[in-house]
Image: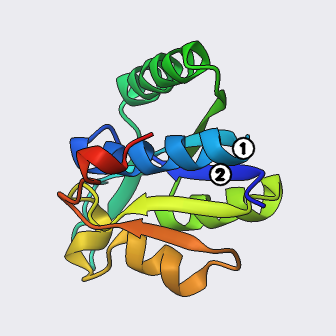
Amino acid sequence: MYERILVPLDGSDVAEEALVHAREIARYFGSRLYLLHVVEPLLVPSLPSFAGPELSAREHPGDAEAASNYLQGWVHALSGEGLAAEGLLRHGSPADEILDCQEGLGISLIVIATEDRLGLGIFAGERTSDAVLARSEVPVLVVPVGWKPDEGARA
């Protein structure tokens, strides 16, 4: 039923709460987990123009390397548990990249936490999870922040 599960991770404990649920679903259905980290460009002021300062997108070189190491750590841990997992590193808007992966990889379920780090979307009043839920063409399991399954319910 859920052959391919996409789990967006931003390196926060909040995002990793979604992985707890995704891993159990994957174990039950024999699914492959796709762990996605999106490196967002930083908007920095560039040379001012007559209209005022302009913003340009730049990426900190260490971000992609740190994200890759983070993903590989999770892939290794999940593989050690007997789960099929793959790390994906993308650059851009988290919601857009999540939805692009959903379509491009044939994802059948997205598991995402309700809150994400304070990214650019927060200032515009948008959370990544809200945007994904509104635009996804596949089921989305939204894990509330701080919600933990009962100890007796764990497999």
Q: Is residue 108 above or below residue 26?
A: below
Q: Residue at x 50, y 67 (%)?
A: 95
| Numbered disc 1: secondary structure | loop
**Residue 5: mark:** 2
Asked if the residues shown at circle 1 and circle 2 are in contact, with their CB atoms under 8 angstroms apart, the answer is yes
Q: Nearer the viewer, mark 1 or mark 2?
A: 1
Q: Residue at x 40, y 79 (%)?
A: 130
Going by the numbered disc 2, the residue's amino acid type is: Ile
Q: Which residue is mark 1?
A: 31
**The quarter of the displayed image where residue 125 is located:** bottom left
Across the whole image, how many numbered discs are drawn on residues? Answer: 2
x, y percentage for residue 4? 73, 50
User: Local crowd at mark 2 within 10 Å, few (<14), some, or many (≥20)?
Assistant: many
- Whether residue 76 is visible here, answered yes or no, is yes
User: Local crowd at mark 1 within 10 Å, few (<14), some, or many (≥20)?
Assistant: many
x, y percentage for residue 25? 58, 50
Of the pair 145 and 137, the residue shown nearer to us:
145
Of the pair 123 and 49, the residue shown nearer to us:
123
- The residue at the far bottom in this view is 134
Q: Residue at x 73, y 62 (%)?
A: 108
- The quadrant of the rendering that contains the C terminus is top left
x, y percentage for residue 21? 44, 50
x, y percentage for residue 39? 45, 43
